[in-house]
Structures are given as C-alpha cells and as structure tokens.
C-alpha cells in the first residue's frame, strides 16, 4: 500500500474509528484520540504487508481494538458507576455530557460485550465481521451482544436513562 493510498483510507475511516473509540473509552475523547493515533501509527508501520485495501476498515478497527485492550490492561479502574451517574446527572450546560449516562453504563459492562455492542449497533458490523475484528467465535459474539444488551438495559433502567 502506498503512502497516498494509506492517507486516503485514513481520511475515510477516521471519523467512524474515533466515534467507536470514544464510546469504547466511555466518553473519554482524549484517550480515544490517543488510541486512534497510536492505531494509525501501528497500521502505517505494517502497511507494506497489507494486501486487502477493501478490508482496511476491519483491519484498522482490529488494530484499534487491540490497542484499546493493551491500554486497559495497563491501568486500573478509578471510579464506580454511581459516581459517574452523579456527575452525569448534575446540572451541566455543556453538550459533551449528553451521553454521559450511556458512557457510564457502557463502562460497567465487560470490554468484550462493550466492543461487540459498539461494533454492531454503532458501526453496523455483522456478527462475522465482529468475530474477525475481535478474534472471538461468531457464537461468542452473539452471546456478548445478548449479554451486553441485557446489562445495558439493566443499568439504564436503574438510573432512569431509558
């Protein structure tokens, strides 16, 4: 893949990737941007061996997902759900807090379920494509979607976000 082709693919994919990572990072746009930048750097460094330009989005999402997981393994949780909901429910005029309840609920479901939910409902990926991105079997992805929906529903109903 040439440099120009890579740039073209990045321009077409970056908005969707950042949206996915922002949700995966539970609203932390700065962290999402850092992970996106690191993912694109990793992709560029290995782009010489990439031979399927039509699968660039799935490839970059897989790199970003793995980068996110590496980052999560290196840190420990700092806040609990109730504290995040209290922050989100405060009177705030800033529009950036509009989805804070959803981000707080997403933060409380396991990363694999969160990833499957976001890839399926936010990015429109099919179960097979999610399986390719995450490395889980299609049956495992279906189970993650089912469990993730149930957990999200529980959190959102419990805190009046539904």
Image: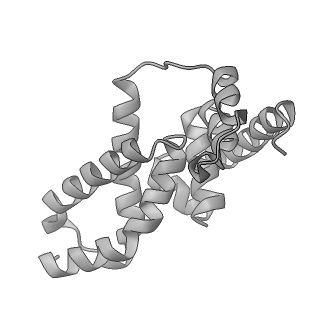
The x, y position of residue 72, in whole percent, is 41, 30
Is 113 positioned to the left or the right of 4 in the image? right
Task: State whether residue 19 is above or below residue 77.
Answer: below
Horizontal relation, residue 81 to residue 35: left or right: right
Q: Is residue 122 above or below residue 146?
A: below
Query: Which residue is at the front of the view, 44 or 127?
Result: 44
With 115 as the anchor, is 64 left or right in this view?
Answer: left
Which scheme is used to colour this image of the protein?
A: one colour
Q: Quadrant of residue 108?
A: top right
Report the residue at 78% width, 33% height from top: 155
Residue 94 in view: yes
- Please give the count of numbered marks on the rendered protein: 0
Q: At 60% from the left edge and 42% from the top edge, which residue is drawn?
A: 114
Residue 2 seen in the current view = no
The N terminus: image quadrant = bottom left
Hey, which quadrant is residue 43 in on the image? bottom left
Which image quarter is the C terminus in?
top right
80 is higher (above) or lower (below) than 63: above
């Amino acid at each position: 893949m040439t440099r120009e082709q890579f740039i073209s693919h990045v321009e077409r994919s970056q908005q969707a990737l950042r949206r996915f990572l922002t949700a995966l990072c539970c609203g932390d746009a700065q962290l999402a941007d850092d992970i996106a930048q690191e993912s694109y750097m990793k992709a560029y460094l290995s782009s010489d061996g990439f031979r399927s330009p039509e699968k660039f989005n799935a490839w970059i999402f897989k790199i970003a997902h793995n980068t996110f997981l590496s980052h999560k393994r290196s840190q420990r949780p700092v806040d609990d759900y109730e504290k995040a909901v209290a922050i989100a429910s405060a009177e705030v005029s800033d529009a950036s807090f509009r989805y804070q309840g959803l981000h707080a609920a997403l933060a409380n479901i396991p990363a694999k379920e969160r990833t499957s939910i976001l890839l399926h409902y936010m990015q429109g990926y099919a179960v097979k494509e999610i399986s390719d991105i995450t490395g889980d079997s299609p049956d495992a992805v279906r189970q993650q979607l089912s469990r993730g929906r149930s957990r999200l529903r529980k959190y959102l109903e419990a805190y009046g976000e539904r």
